[in-house]
Image (cartoon, rainbow, N blue to C red):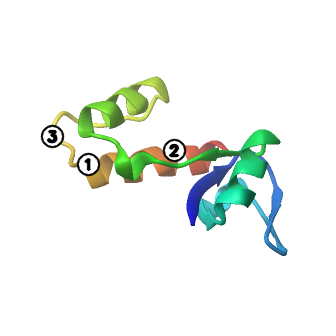
Amino acid sequence: MKKIYLIGAAMVGTKLRYPSDGVIETSPEQADDLVKAGLARVDDLDSLKVDELRAIALAESVSVGPAVLKDDLIAAIRARRQNKA
């Protein structure tokens, strides 16, 4: 299974899903198809280091303090992405 987040509404499996659904797990093949179609992006935040997450948070205008834990950074980035949609 591969984690993605949608940029626009798309069929995932047999269900119409929306960006507001947050991170979705789907087959690698379907995830790749959705990314290629410009409807989704891969969510690999769990595999990143804290410094990399801070850089993403900064680039995406996510407000975080200096003593934030990795899980807090991931949650803040995902929440921002979900609210942007």
| Left or right: where 4 falls relative to 45 | right
Between the residue at mark 1 and the residue at mark 2, the CA separation in whole angstroms equals 15 Å
Whole-percent x, y for residue 58 in the image: 39, 26
Q: Amino acid at mark 2?
A: Arg
Q: Considering the image in quadrants, where does the N terminus appear?
A: bottom right
Q: Secondary structure at mark 3?
A: loop
Mark 2 sits on what residue?
80
Mark 1 sits on what residue?
70
Q: How many marks?
A: 3
Whole-percent x, y for residue 39 in the image: 77, 45
Q: Amino acid at mark 3?
A: Ala
Mark 3 sits on what residue?
67
Q: Residue at x 53, y 49 (%)?
A: 43
Q: Amino acid at mark 1?
A: Lys
Whole-percent x, y for residue 57 in the image: 40, 33
Q: Residues within 10 Å of mark 3 (few under 14, many from 20)?
A: few
